[in-house]
Amino acid sequence: MNNRMVMVAAAVVGFAAVGCNSKVTGGGSLRGLDGDRATFTANFDSCKGIDQAQGGFLYKDKNSDVSVKGDLVYISAPLPGWCDFVGGLGVNGVNGGAASISYMAVARWESRNPKQPGSGTALLCVRDAGEGKKADSADFVAVGLWRDVDGLGGFLTSPPFHTNSGTLQGNIQSHDCSSPTSPGPT
C-alpha cells in the first residue's frame, strides 16, 4: 500500500476519533480541471448524532464529464487543517485564517452521467471562512472521488479517479446544532 493510501486509512480512523455533531450547508462554483466551471452544493448534518448523519452533495465538472450525487456517511468535527490533509491526497487544500472552520466528510456517490456510470466513495473538505466582514479568506471546497473496485469501494486500494479543489464562488456556512436552521441544498 502506498503512502497516499496509508494517509487515507489514517484519516478514516481519525474521523471516528474526532466526530461530533456538525451541520454545514452551501454551494457555488469553482474552477474545473480544464479551466471551465465546476459546481458543488452540500447539506451535511449530524446534529442528531454521528450515527444519524444525513444529507449529501452534488458535484459537476462539465469538461471532465464528471457529474455525481452523494449521500453523507460521516462528517468530522470542525477542526483546522482538514483541508490541508485533503491536500496531502493530491487535492490542493489550503487552510484558512483564524475565523475559518474546516470540515471533512465521507460520502457514497453515484454517477449522474450515463457516459461515465459508476459509484464509489468521496472524501470532501469544505471550509467556511466566515461571513461578510468577519471572513478572513475565501470559502474553499476539495473533492476526491474513488470508484468502487472492491469491498472497500476502492477507497483504500487505489488512487482517486477525480480530484478537484479551489476557492468557492458562493458560500459555505457552518450552523450551530442547538439552533434551528433552514435546510441547505441537496
Image: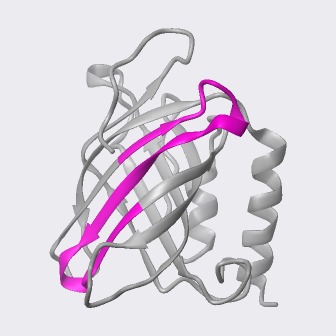
Image position of 115 (left or right of 76): left
User: Could you tell me residue 177's position as x and y percent?
Assistant: 55, 18
Taking depth in this image into account, of 84 and 32 the one nearest to the observer is 32
The furthest residue to the top: 179
According to the image, what is the colour scheme of the structure?
one colour
Image position of 6 (left or right of 57): right
Q: Is residue 24 visible?
A: yes
User: Could you tell me residue 169's position as x and y percent?
Assistant: 21, 49
- The magenta region covers 42-69
Asked if residue 143 is among those painted magenta in the image, a careful observer would answer no
Q: Is residue 38 depicted above or below 43 in this figure? A: below
The residue at the point 50 percent across, 61 percent down is 93
User: Could you tell me residue 46's position as x and y percent?
Assistant: 60, 33
The residue at the point 72 percent across, 70 percent down is 8
User: The C terminus appears in which quarter of the rendering?
Assistant: top left
Image position of 28 (left or right of 9): left
Asked if residue 67 is among those painted magenta in the image, a careful observer would answer yes
